[in-house]
Amino acid sequence: MTDPEFVTSSVAHARAVPAAAADGRGANRPALSRAMVLLLAVVCGAAVANIYYAQPLLPVISRALGVSQGAGGLVVTVSQIGYALSLALLVPLGDVLERRRLVTVLLGLSAVAVLGAAASPSLGFLLVAIAVVGVTSAVAQIVVPMAASLAPDHQRGSAVGTVMSGLLIGIMIARTVAGVLAQIGNWRLVFVFAAVLMAILAVVLRLVLRRVPPSENTTYPQLLRSVLALVRTESLLRRRMALAAVGMGCFTVLWTASSFLLAGRPYGFGPAVIGLFGLAGVVGAAAAAKAGRLADRGHGRRVTTGGLALLAVSWPVLAVAGVGGPTGVIALTVGIIALNLAQQALLISHQSAIYRRVPHARSRVTTALMVSAFAGATVASALTAALYPLVGWLGVSVLGLVIALVGAGIWILELVLPSPAEPLAAPSAADDTVVPAGRPVGAGRVSSSREEIGCA
């Protein structure tokens, strides 16, 4: 199965073809089977879940290792740092390496790293192991653009939506699984389970997935420079990156702080009950396929507008959870559903927009988008861990609302001064140019600098 992606950046000085050749075969490509799409969704969800198992267990881990809640919160921060680094340095390899091998190797390494976390005798050892887990978990973001490349044009949004739904559901289910297993055994059992799951998925994927050849023949430094060139020249990508950071920031504030809220007064829940709240997030995450279908029909901007509005509205509802009792539980549940629905819809709309704009470099635009998203998550988790002991649940709810309003401001700018959205053609290999979509190579070329001005 041949991947039709080609490099977009002339900085990489790699081979390039016209836009029609770069992605034109997408319309004639056979549809991905439902079973394969679901398998890729499971791989995404299981891989990224590794960095979220610890969230509902932070109070338990902190007590078991004899550290403060603030220090225990570093487990989430370190995992996000490792994940963000791997998004920057590993995900672009999806354009130059055979992806079946890359994915299965990373799943195997993830199994080893998670076992290391299970055996950690101290917080220091745990932080190192979790950092490696974060690095290997970036396999999820290699699978997403791979699914987009394997799917035909009419199925792409739906396929990406389903795979991303699996990713977000994996994050939510991770909390429930972690809570139940910790209640049955202890927090170490959670990571043993994760290691076994990674090993099984590595074997299954190796057996059932065809080889996915690389789409580009270039050096690794050139590949990384091409990511920076895309960020520099594409205003649509830059704005979607900023919005992705906002969405993941809100998401991380919620799930980092909610563990401390539910474990302390006025709730005092154990890890199993805390984990069950992750099921509420599944309702929102399950909307991914629908968001993808809406994007396929040309409603991506409406999805973004609605997602940002819902993101902001969710925080006043979540703030009520601080009162405790049935009212607090209901408010927290409703807020979790709303925020996760908003975050998932936003992420799908971002990916649909940038995959359509730059169809020949999906792994690299995924790198840019997700590095920004998880950089936002890293900052948000650090702020939440530091602020929660000082300002409590109400204070971090205000923090989440402020982040959401920043996203609304960015989107208003996009609505007033819209970025180009038509597919960007691959440049000529002979010069540093960008060919506008719909024009043949060799005619009407626009320089990279002019394109950047046009996108501003």
Image (cartoon, rainbow, N blue to C red):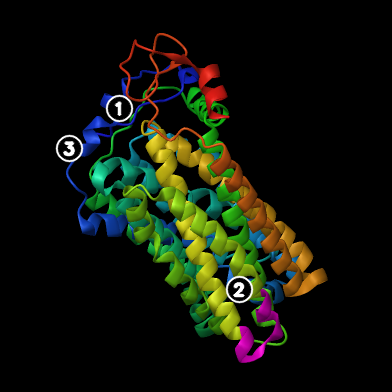
Q: Give the mark toward the camera: 2 or 1.
A: 1
Examine the rendered structure and indicate whether residue 435 appears above or below residue 271.
above
Mark 1 vs mark 3, CA separation in Å: 13 Å
Q: Which residues are magenta?
A: 319-328
Inspect this view and state whether residue 338 appears: yes
Residue 198 shows in this picture? no
Q: Residues within 10 Å of mark 2 (few under 14, many from 20)?
A: many
* Amino acid at the residue labelled 2: Leu
Tell me whether circle 2 and circle 1 mark residues in contact (CB < 8 Å): no
Q: Which residue in the protein does label 1 denote? A: 22
- Rounded to the nearest whole Å, what is the CA distance between mark 2 and mark 1? 46 Å
Please provide percent x and percent y for residue 63: 71, 76
Identity of the residue drawn at 26% across and 25% down = 21
Name which quarter of the figure residue 36 lies in. Answer: bottom left
Label drawn at residue 28: 3
In the image, residue 209 lies at what x, y percent?
Answer: 24, 48
Q: Residue 359 placed where, x, y %?
A: 36, 34
Query: Image point 33% across, 14% down: which residue?
Result: 441
Q: Is residue 413 above or below residue 179?
A: above
Q: Name the image quarter holding residue 85.
A: top right
Q: Earlier in the sequence, mark 1 or mark 3?
A: 1
The label number, if any, that marks residue 57 in the structure image: 2
Task: Look at the numbered disc 2 and give the secondary structure of its residue.
Answer: helix
Q: For the stretch drawn in magenta, what is the main secondary structure?
A: helix
Above/below status of 230 relative to 337: above
**Residue 169: x percent and y percent?**
43, 66
Q: Quadrant of the N terminus?
A: top left
- Which residue is painted at 50% across and 26% down in the image? 226
| Kind of residue indicated by mark 3 | Asn
Number of the front mark, 3 or 2: 3
Judge the density around disc 1: few (<14), some (14-19), many (≥20) Cα neighbours within 10 Å: many
